[in-house]
């Protein structure tokens, strides 16, 4: 009996090996169930540890809260579709966790429930993660009509992980100036892991941080409406390797920027200051030809939405720092603004705000200051010329550079193509030189790479950190 069993096992093993050597067709991807996550109300709570299992698809309905002490785990490859009518939104409250760890081959996708070809920015709410780290407004209720508060004193607070995750067609204005972004971080602590995250076609900001000190790597903001990276309320994390690409016909009703950074909405000197540090960012705006830019509303296929503003809009007492980065193809490259009685320009002079070892290219106007008289009531039109920002960017001993047109960057293709953007520098590109890591703000916590921007000269469309998990055509993807 034992001998017979052994022979059967050997026979089965040999059969298995011989089958794997054949040129059989690839197995059909598994088909799971379609399940509801939430009931369409504003108060649906996940009260016990829950796992969203692959290959199931989940319909996110209404405001779904992961409450304090509960962990929501999302398996690689899971698709969560936001319901439009109920403004489906997933909120990780203080003390709750999301463990969304996708893979390069099987990213986790939050997307619109609308059919291919019919998806739009703002089809659903978005992803909101809230923590117990500090902000400069003590304790806040997160914007967007959500009940939840954020803030505390736990700097290493852990809200879980989002890795190899896409968020598509989210971002809604709940009420006037009260929006849900693609992804919102409220006082999220450094114990949280954020890497390889793409936000596409957001109806508001792609990424916004309200306080906290969470770090992040490998972020993509693709064709959002408002700002790509918005930092407020004392956000002090470190972010490295980030890409943004804009649609020239898609801008917000307010000014759309690459970066928008405030200490807080009132421009107060409350601490902690917004002092996040970004490095190796590549930002590509909507302006393909600066000399032909007409600053008009979109009326035909050749125009650019006039509500686009700048690559860097630094204001309201922010102390943001940006190193070794590229700002390209925006109407204005850099604005350093003293609005609401702030002293943002003073922080730049004192080295508390930093734009260092950076390149501005292909902008209609490189610099603008926006100095205000009498607080925020009167704008000095002479400051439009950007004398302060110009002097600051080109300061003695600095290594910032500017180029008139995109072609001066010597990229391997067109970075402004919406169907096939190519953002990789050639070996003779100015992005391959001029980097520096000696400043105290980037001396630790960053990978010391030998290039400016998000990609190395050796990277190609087939070999870079976006390959395999990013999607630059989510409108036509069948989920």
Image (cartoon, rainbow, N blue to C red):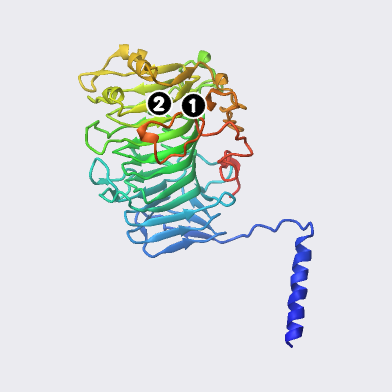
Specify whether 136 is left or right of 369.
left
Dot 2, how many residues are within 10 Å of its Cα: few (below 14), some (14-19), or many (20+)? many
Dot 1, how many residues are within 10 Å of its Cα: few (below 14), some (14-19), or many (20+)? many
Above or below, comparing residue 269 to residue 28 in the picture: above
Q: Is residue 80 visible?
A: yes
The CA distance from mark 1 to mark 2 is: 20 Å
Specify whether 256 is left or right of 235.
right
Check residue 356 in the rendering and tell me which mark sits there, or answer none: 2
Q: Could you tell me residue 147's position as x and y percent?
A: 30, 50
Q: Is residue 228 visible?
A: no
What residue is drawn where x is 61% and y is 32%? Answer: 420
Asked whether 437 or 336 is in front, the reply is 437
Above or below, comparing residue 464 to residue 451 in the picture: below
**SS assignment at label 1:** loop
Q: Could you tell me residue 447's position as x and y percent?
A: 47, 39
Specify whether 16 is left or right of 150.
right
The furthest residue to the front? 438
Q: Could you tell me residue 446's position as x and y percent?
A: 43, 39
Residue receiving disc 1: 285
What residue is drawn where x is 33% and y is 16%? Answer: 388
The furthest residue to the left? 374
Check residue 46 in the rendering and tell me which mark sits there, or answer none: none
Q: Could you tell me residue 153's position as x and y percent?
A: 25, 49
Asked whether 217 or 451 is in front, the reply is 451
Asked whether 283 or 351 is in front, the reply is 351
**SS assignment at label 2:** strand
What residue is drawn where x is 36% and y is 31%? Answer: 321
Above or below, comparing residue 195 to residue 297 in the picture: below
Q: First in sequence, mark 1 or 2: give its number.
A: 1
The answer to which image quadrant residue 344 occupies is top left
The N terminus lies in quadrant: bottom right
């Amino acid at each position: 009996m034992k001998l017979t069993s052994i022979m059967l096992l050997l026979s089965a093993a040999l059969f298995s090996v011989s089958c794997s050597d054949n040129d059989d067709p690839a197995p059909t991807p598994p088909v799971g169930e379609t399940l509801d996550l939430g009931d369409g109300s504003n108060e649906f709570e996940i009260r016990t540890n829950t796992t969203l299992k692959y290959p199931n698809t989940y319909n996110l309905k209404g405001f779904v809260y992961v409450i304090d002490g509960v962990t929501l785990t999302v398996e690689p490859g899971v698709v969560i579709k936001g319901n439009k009518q109920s403004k489906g939104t997933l909120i990780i409250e203080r003390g709750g966790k999301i463990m969304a760890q996708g893979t390069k081959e099987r990213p986790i996708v939050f997307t619109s429930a609308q059919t291919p070809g019919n998806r739009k920015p703002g089809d659903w709410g978005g992803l909101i993660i809230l923590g117990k780290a500090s902000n400069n407004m003590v304790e806040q209720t997160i914007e967007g009509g959500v009940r939840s508060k954020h803030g505390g004193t736990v700097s290493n607070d852990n809200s879980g992980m989002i890795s190899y995750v896409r968020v598509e067609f989210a971002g809604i204005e709940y009420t006037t100036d009260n929006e849900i972004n693609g992804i919102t971080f409220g006082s999220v602590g450094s114990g949280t892991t954020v890497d390889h995250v793409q936000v596409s076609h957001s109806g508001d900001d792609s990424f916004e941080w309200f306080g906290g000190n969470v770090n992040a790597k490998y972020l993509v903001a693709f064709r959002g409406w408002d700002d790509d990276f918005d930092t407020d309320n004392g956000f002090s994390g470190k972010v490295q390797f980030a890409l943004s690409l804009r649609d020239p016909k898609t801008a917000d009703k307010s000014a759309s920027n690459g970066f928008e950074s405030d200490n807080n909405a009132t421009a107060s000197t409350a601490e902690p200051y917004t002092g996040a540090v970004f490095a190796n960012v590549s930002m590509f705006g909507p302006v393909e030809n600066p000399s032909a830019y007409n600053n008009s509303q979109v009326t035909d296929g050749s125009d650019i939405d006039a509500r686009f503003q700048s690559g860097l809009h630094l204001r309201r007492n922010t102390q943001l720092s940006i190193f070794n980065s590229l700002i390209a193809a925006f109407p204005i490259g850099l604005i350093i603004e003293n609005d609401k009685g702030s002293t943002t320009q003073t922080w730049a002079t004192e080295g508390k705000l930093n734009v260092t070892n950076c390149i501005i290219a292909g902008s209609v106007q490189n610099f603008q200051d926006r100095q205000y008289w009498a607080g925020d009531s009167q704008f000095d039109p002479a400051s439009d010329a950007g004398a302060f920002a110009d002097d600051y960017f080109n300061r003695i001993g600095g290594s910032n550079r500017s180029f008139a047109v995109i072609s001066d960057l010597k990229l391997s293709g067109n970075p402004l193509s919406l169907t096939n953007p190519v953002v990789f520098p050639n070996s003779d590109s100015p992005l391959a030189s001029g980097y520096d890591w000696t400043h105290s703000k980037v001396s630790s916590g960053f990978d010391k790479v030998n290039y400016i921007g998000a990609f190395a000269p050796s990277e190609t469309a087939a070999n870079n950190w976006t390959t395999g998990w990013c999607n630059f055509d989510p409108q036509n993807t069948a989920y």
